[in-house]
Amino acid sequence: MAKVHNYSAGPCILPEEVLKQASEAVINFNNLNLSLLEISHRSKDFIEVMSNAQELVKELLNVPDGYSILFLQGGASLGFYISAINGMKSDGTGAYIDTGTWSSKAIKEAKKLGNVNVIASSKDKNFSYIPTNFEIPSDANYIHYTSNNTIFGTQFKTFPKSAIPVICDMSSDIFSKEINVSDYDLIYAGAQKNMGPAGTTLYIVKNDFLGKTGRDIPSMLDLQIHIDKESMFNTPPVYPIYVSMLNLQWLKKNGGVKWIEGVNNQKSELLYAEIDRNPLFKGIVATEDRSNMNATFVLKDESQTEAFDAAWKAANISGIKGHRSAGGYRASMYNALPLESVQALVDVMQNFEKTNG
Ligand SMILES: *Cc1c(COP(=O)(O)O)cnc(C)c1O
């Protein structure tokens, strides 16, 4: 079977060895002669999985003391509401930066709880840049932003120091580069972009941030309850947590976040250099705001679409069609995508120039 270069935007590519280990645990986990899927989440063997996964998050991201690590359900889409209900006072305000589909959805959910102040937006240019001319209001309960805009292909490279708590949706770039966790009060990320399979959402929350809203928060949405129960208030999503743990072990074994950041930079530099060099293609977003995870680009001549699609499909490339709201192409280069897969796409683009230029 020929190798497929998997550029899927999410759920995304995982390392082959992780998939193998994961499949073994479905049949026989830890030599128990039982499947991971059929043992109690309160068993010693699963509790070890949970604590290993939490430890790996802590270690790989240098999470300081005073933070808790949770693996919950509901996806990042429930994270929009969970982050707001745990952060916004009952008569308070949440400040938001709107950089595309996912931040717009976060704004929509927060509005159900109270005042939302959208302090900056790149909607005027179809989210093709990261706004910079904004001031973080001192009277909001928090500022929320989306670190990487999976659909449009923009990414915050820096974020201003904030006097108020910072909440960040890091679904599509967590573990792709080094971050300073102490800059944040709450980080959340759906697993299926860069951490593991779909089905769990990572929360990294500063303990001091919680308990200040004056709200009666439903138990399943209350981060403090999940902290008190060590992320096992109810049955956790055991399998996605296990596979995420395996993937984080893979990352650690290979050199951790610093290592993968180097690899990710190499991959994105290779592809963007070709997008800029090749006269048949052009990037969609502002150069300085380009995402290292999701590279978006278009053919200058749309009439070549069919021919180009046939060319990359013939090279066993999968998943580079752009999102319907952005059009064109999107190459998602998450951690497990090897440099050789990016080279394969670049080769296709170069050959396409020779035959169609
Ligand atoms: C995919 C994505 C989401 C939605 O995640 P779900 O887990 O499907 O709810 C939210 N934010 C960002 C940045 C994403 O990439």
Image (cartoon, grey):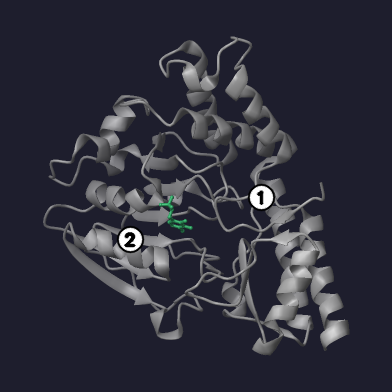
Q: Position of residue 301 (x, y in %)?
A: 68, 90
Q: Is residue 271 above or below residue 352?
A: above
Q: In the rendered view, does 319 fall on the left or right side of 44?
A: right
Instruction: Check disc 2 and report its element: helix, strand or loop.
Output: helix
Q: In the rendered view, does 171 fall on the left or right side of 117?
A: right
Give the residue type that dot 2 points to. Answer: Ala
Return the disc, 1 or 2, that comes first in the chain's sequence.
2
Q: Is mark 2 within 8 Å of ligand 1?
A: yes
Q: Is residue 294 above or below residue 42?
A: below
**What residue would you read off at disc 1?**
335
**What residue would you read off at disc 2?**
106
Closer to us: 281 or 249:
281
Closer to us: 281 or 153:
281
Q: From mark 1 to mark 2, how far is it between C-alphas?
A: 25 Å
Instruction: Check disc 1 and report its element: helix, strand or loop.
Output: loop
Give the residue type that dot 1 points to. Answer: Asn
Q: Position of residue 113 (x, y in %)?
A: 17, 57
Image quadrant containing the C terminus? bottom right
Q: Is residue 237 above or below residue 138?
A: above
For the point 29% across and 38% down, the residue is 223
Query: Within 10 angstroms of label 1, few (less than 14), some, or many (20 or more) residues?
Result: many
Ligand 1 quadrant in view: bottom left
Quarter of the view holding residue 327? bottom right
Q: Is residue 211 above or below residue 124?
A: above
Q: Position of residue 16 (x, y in %)?
A: 72, 39
